[in-house]
Amino acid sequence: MGTLGKCAGGECGRFRMQDGGSEVSEETAPTGRTGLVPVDAAEARRRVKALLGAVLGRSPLWTQETVVADALLVTSELVTNALRHAGGVTAFEAMADRVGLRLVVEDASCGLPSTKEPSGDFTPGGYGWPMICRLATSVTVSLLPSGGKRIQVFVPL
């Protein structure tokens, strides 16, 4: 097990890497989940949006709309990165309660996520991972024994 650091509180480029899974406390134990592998980021967003709707219900709070939008952005970035850079999504799980959303995305690549150094040329790519690290309070990358990796994130709601 190698520890590279933890990506939390807005810190980018550092995250915890481990060989096993992560724990969910009783306070954040999931009350709803979805686990089928999505074919694209749009499908993953639809599933997570439905899950969050079931868990949170209808609320007039604008702040809830903001955190749901953040959760959907993280979902989209994780799935898009797996599809574009890591050989595809091999497993997907979303679990949520009123405290937060826990996403697990596995892919076929052992390559670690990377960031792009700002260059001022505005070329596409390299900005999703820092965004994930800013919006999630916990990010863990685990190499899988059979190959590939698992990325787990927790997005507070």
Image: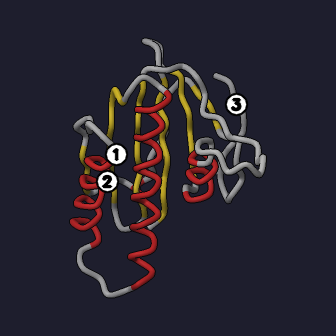
Residue 11 at x, y = what percent? Answer: 72, 53
User: Of tags 3 and 2, which is closer to the observer?
Assistant: 2
Name the N-terminal-most of marks 3 and 2.
Answer: 3
Residue on which the image places disc 2: 45
Marks 3/2: CA–CA distance: 30 Å
Q: Quadrant of the C terminus?
A: bottom left
- Circles 1 and 2, Cβ within 8 Å, touching? The answer is yes
Q: Residues within 10 Å of mark 1 (few under 14, many from 20)?
A: many
Q: Which mark is residue 94?
A: none
Q: Amino acid at mark 2?
A: Arg
For badge 1, the amino acid type reads: Ala
| Residue on which the image places disc 3 | 3
Please give the name of the residue rendered at 64% of the width and 49% of the height, measured from the top-left corner: 130
Reply above or below: 83 against 137: above
Q: What's the CA distance linking mark 1 and mark 2?
A: 6 Å
In depth, the one of 92 and 42 nearer the eye is 42
- The local secondary structure at tag 1 comes to helix
Q: Which mark is residue 41?
A: 1
Please indicate whether residue 95 sits to the left or right of residue 16 in the image.
Answer: left
